[in-house]
Image: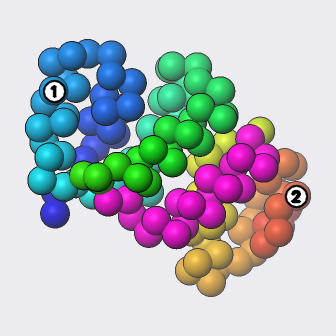
Amino acid sequence: MRAIDTNVLVRLLARDDAKQVAAAEHFVEGGAWVSHLVLMEAAWVLDGVYDLAPAAIATAIEMLLDHKNLALEKTDVVVAAVAQFRKRPTLGFSDCLIVEVARRAGHIPVGTFDRELGRLADVQRL
């Protein structure tokens, strides 16, 4: 299966350049894989460049989970990260995904200097 980069995923979500959207849609027609890293970068872009609210970012990621042509890396991890992000949007999606990936891999606690992140289960504030 093909994989896509962050800029392709952002085009599919933002739909702000008709030519690039068409190219992105054509590329993923036969199916495409989205890594956690690409998903995290896309969330950063949606926040930092497009200034989307956390709820809108969570909705966008949920739409990707249901996309007929996209396969997200370890969807169960992404679903859990989105659920955590909806509960604590001040964390940011990337922090929620980092914790969920570590949980599933059995590498906990996650060490952090971040006060907000340090409040989660399986996270240790240093």
- The residue at 88%/58% (across/down) is 119
Image x and y of residue 18, in percent: 21, 16
- The residue at 72%/68% (across/down) is 110
SS at badge 2: helix
Image x and y of residue 71, in percent: 32, 59
Task: Please identify the quadrant where the N terminus is shown.
Answer: bottom left
- Image: 26 above or below 121: above
Q: What residue type is labelled 2?
A: Arg
Image x and y of residue 23, in percent: 13, 30
Q: What residue type is labelled 1?
A: Ala
Which quadrant of the view contains residue 97?
Answer: bottom right
Task: Please identify the quadrant where the C terminus is shown.
Answer: bottom right
Which colour style is shown?
A: rainbow
Q: Badge 1 local density, few (<14 within 10 Å), some, or many (20+)?
A: few
Residue interval drawn in magenta: 71-89
Q: Is residue 91 visible?
A: no
SS at badge 1: helix
Q: Mark 1 points at which residue?
A: 22
- Image: 31 above or below 23: below
- The residue at 78%/47% (across/down) is 88
Q: Name the residue under label 2.
A: 119
